[in-house]
Amino acid sequence: MPTLRELVADAEGRKIALGHFNISDLEGLWGVFNAARKLNLPVIIGTSEGERDFVGVPQAVALIKSLREEFNYPVFLNADHTYSYDKIKEAIDAGYDAVIFDGTKLSFDENVSETRKCVEYARKTRPEVLIEGEIGYIGTSSKILDEIPAGASISPESLTKPEEIMEFVKQTGVDLVAPAVGNLHGMLRSGKEPALNIPLISKLREAAGVPLVLHGGSGTSDEDFKNAIKAGISIVHINTEIRLAYRKAVQIFLQENPDEIAPYKFMKPAVQGVERVTEARLRLFNNL
């Protein structure tokens, strides 16, 4: 079975992207995994700090390990948006395949310093773990938004700059880096998401020297996704879209079946809703 590092390199070489989908429970996990297996594509499962608190760090690792071993399948676990060294260390020690230190609210120097600590710890304990850094604030919540989050890097002058990303990677030694290129966490209620700066993505990939990750993918147009991947994005994160599909599916089922109390019955539509969104995104990211 190929490693995650090998799959990222393969994706970049083929101008496709690995899909990264967050989960909060077993229903979300099955929805994502079923879609990936249907298409025979590798997939990354993400858990944010809040999602890890709910699922359990060792429990998430055990779930992914069980799927990988039972099905001999390339499914990987990523500690999404992690804001402290201690939480990064916890995920690495527990067996996560990748981790992200999010220092976007820190100064550049503080972000570099804390990210480098995470890289150094991984290299001396589990060097196979991929370490991702982030430069450029794009908000923090995977939810429906009424407006662009305060401080989000959306204006041209506030997007990640080539010289910044080059210095960031040089000083931290990260394996992956997530820039601000017009992307936003969450989805705007208006449905009008900011456009991605495709030329900037190309410049950032060249300057970084490592693969790029697109966070806040939910709501992005298909055309922007395709062009961003061609320009240098190798992993795309989706969360809000599958949360929305999950909630709508359960809500509709309970409205139509108000007397149903068996969780395994009213949660089945949630699995199916997550699976539909995941499959559609995986097809797009892989030119299927």
Image: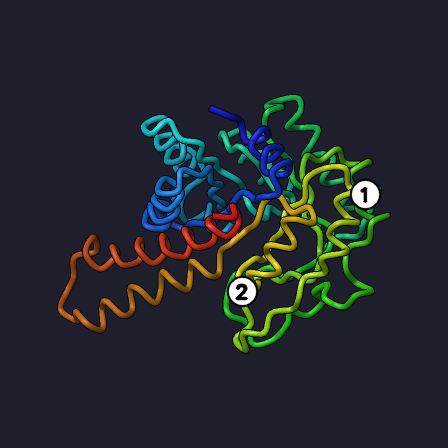
**In screen coordinates, is 219 left or right of 75?**
right
Which amino acid type is shown beneath numbered disc 2? Gly
Q: Identify the element where label 2 is drawn.
A: loop
How dense is the environment of label 1, judged by Cα within 10 Å: few (below 14), some, or many (20 and up)? some
Near-viewer residue (204 or 123): 204
Q: Is residue 248 above or below residue 109?
A: below
Residue matched to label 1: 207
Q: Position of residue 255 (x, y in %)?
A: 22, 73
Q: Quadrant of residue 193?
A: bottom right
**In screen coordinates, is 70 left or right of 174?**
left
The numbered mark at residue 219 is 2
Q: Position of residue 213 (x, y in %)?
A: 63, 46
Cα distance in 3D space between marks 1 and 2: 27 Å
Residue displayed at 37% across by 46% down = 35
Q: How is the image coloured?
A: rainbow
Q: Identify the element where label 1 is drawn.
A: helix
